[in-house]
Image (tube, rainbow, N blue to C red):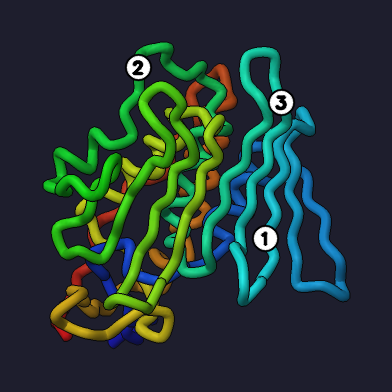
Amino acid sequence: MPPAPDTVEVDFVTPRHLAGGGDPAWITVPLHRACGWSYGDDPLMPRVLLSSPNQKALLRLEPDPDDQWWILHHAAEPDRPAWYTSFGARTPVELIAAVTDTLTDPAPASDAPCDPFGALRQAGWSPYGDNGLVSPDKTAYVERLGTPADPGAWFVTVTLGMHQKVWQARFAAHTPPHLVAAFTDALADPKPVHRSGRSLATLDPNVITRKTTDVLAVYVAGALEDRVHSLAARHTTTPPVPVPARQTPPSHGRSR
């Protein structure tokens, strides 16, 4: 009898905003390998710097227990002042990747008006404050400061209880709206994300749903490569080499 294939335990977690940060390589590796961003680091510092090919954007990943861990700066352009966005350590990488994937998309952004609140309203988020929405479970808040005539920065804050902030994302006032919308679209997505239980913000079954499944290790290891291939294909003028379709691995899920 052939040996059983290697499997790993994977937690599929909802809501995704309480799933923990995840693997930073989900963002940094595709930026470098698929989008041509150059990287620099300091062997004596736990810091990674990635700069876009046109040198207009700089992504800094720097662990800082008292501030944001991810900071993306973008230089001024003829039609827009300089802007930045930043993300706390426990911001799910899938949400940050939605921003970087949209920023690096070679297809021009649509000129149609963009409402970053739109996907959240469709997902059942409720009004909060003067210009904000709160998630149905009351753990995530999206607000825009300023006034309709002079709109300001966006803040996305996730909390557990009154005083336990899990993470915060900040978008400066001049951040392109379609990038903010990419983040809120990903935030509203009901699909679970996979994590290790050790990285979760909470194990409280009243707050998160966690389904643990045994998955073939080869599928877990290949997910990042598939992502790199998919993003690289956006920059080609010929159809990319197709990735062989994978059969869904048999799973023996169990909820915890």
Crowding around mark 2 (Cα neighbors within 10 Å: few <14, some 14 to 19, many 20+) is few
Query: Which comes before the other along the chain, label 1 or label 3?
Result: 1
Q: Dot 1 surroundings within 10 Å: few (below 14), some, or many (20 or more)?
A: many
| Quadrant of residue 130 within the rendered picture | top left
Q: CA distance from mark 2 to mark 3?
A: 21 Å
Q: Position of residue 73 (x, y in %)?
A: 68, 42
Q: Which residue is mark 2?
A: 113
Amino acid of disc 2: Pro
Q: Residue at x 42, y 54 (%)?
A: 94
Q: Quadrant of the N terminus?
A: bottom left
Between label 1 and label 2, give the one nearer the viewer. Answer: 2
Among the two numbered marks 2 and 3 on one chain, the one whose residue lies closer to the N terminus: 3
Q: Residue at x 86, y 66 (%)?
A: 42
Image spot of residue 126 (x, y percent): 15, 48
Q: Quadrant of the C terminus?
A: bottom left
Horizontal arrangement in the rendering, residue 207 relative to residue 164 (left or right): left
Residue 154 seen in the figure: yes
- CB under 8 Å between discs 1 and 2: no
Which of disc 2 and disc 1 is earlier in sequence? 1
Q: Secondary structure at mark 3?
A: loop
Q: Position of residue 131 (x, y in %)?
A: 29, 40
Res 37 seen here: no
Q: SS of the residue at dot 2?
A: loop
- Who is closer to the viewer here, 152 or 183? 152
- The numbered disc on residue 61 is 1
Q: From the viewer's side, name the closer residue of 239 and 18.
A: 18
Viewer-nearest residue: 4 or 156:
156
Q: Residue at label 3?
A: 76
Q: Give the foreground label among 1 and 3.
A: 3
Amino acid under disc 1: Leu
